[in-house]
Amino acid sequence: MLLRFTKMHGLGNDFMVLDLISQHAHIQPKHAKAWGNRHTGVGFDQLLIVEPPNNPDVDFRYRIFNADGSEVEQCGNGARCFARFVLDKRLTTKKTIRVETKSGIIELSIRNDGQVSVNMGPPRLAPAQIPFQAEAEAPSYAIDLDGRQVELAAVSMGNPHAVLRVDNVDSAPVHELGPRLEHHPRFPQRVNVGFLQIIDRHQARLRVWERGAGETQACGTGACAAAVAAIRQGWLDSPVQIELPGGRLSIEWAGSGRPVIMTGPAVRVYEGQIRL
């Protein structure tokens, strides 16, 4: 059986997108792992699947698999590509759509300039909702790494994030601390790890070690989590421009209980077919 797919990226965070509305297949973690291999498969950070919704009040269901085969709750850069994909494929004519994800409903809007804005909903800051093991909610937490204390913020944008402030992202220990914090026992569902450098009150730089994927060119939920963590601690003011290795995202957050709005590009790379 041949499946049509589209290769897309958001700031270099790359995706294989499957339409399972006009074609039918049962995708398993083993397929995502095989297709995600950059030497023997399509190669991607995440596999995005477009499905009919379970909820009549939304337009689509959105599922996400990492390249290691694990299914995850949310992907911000993927959400922008999702919106561009369903419009380009004429699965909808709406410029604003509501999408059901594993972690809840998000709203995607395609602007006239081609950029896509995503209403990610309010961040989740209570430790149990992240999930993160802590006695009480706080702007930051100290974590022990074999006797070394690391200070970080913990935020969920539908998926768990740890955010560390660094002096310079170019020299940040992303590949040392990233995997160690990803698997730290205080994050029972593992965690994405962001390394944040503040430039001024409205600009910052960010590198992200993504759970199940390693360092990526960009992470939309990571940029949202980093902006929330920095605004909470008084380092940044909304709106925020977050510069990632793959490009720039604009993040707006008005404070506790308010939704995070992320705006950035979504690009189609090529169309293909793959055998299931």
Image (cartoon, rainbow, N blue to C red):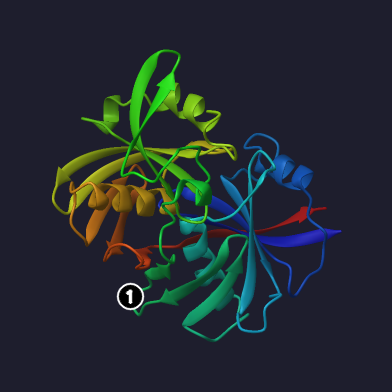
Number of residues whose C-alpha sits closer than 10 Å to that of mark 1, classed few (under 14), some (14–19) or many (20 or more): few
Residue that extends furthest to the right in the rendered view of this protein: 1
Give 33 or 199, whichever is nearer the viewer: 199
Image quarter where the N terminus lies is: bottom right
Residue that extends furthest to the left in the rendered view of this protein: 200
Residue located 63% across and 80% down the image: 91
Quick check: 273 above or below 109?
Answer: above
Residue that extends furthest to the front in the rendered view of this protein: 135
Amino acid at the residue labelled 1: Asp
Residue located 17% across and 54% down the image: 202
Which residue was labeled with disc 1?
Answer: 113
Task: State the image quarter where residue 198 is shown.
Answer: top left
Give 10 or 61, whichever is nearer the viewer: 61
Quick check: 6 above or below 201?
Answer: below
Give the mark count: 1
Could you tell me residue 121's position as x and y percent? 43, 67
Give 222 or 36, whichever is nearer the viewer: 222
Residue that extends furthest to the top in the rendered view of this protein: 147
Residue located 22% across and 62% down the image: 239
State left or right for residue 46 relative to residue 34: left
Could you tell me residue 237's position as x and y percent? 18, 57
Q: Is residue 79 visible?
A: yes
Q: Is residue 219 visible?
A: no
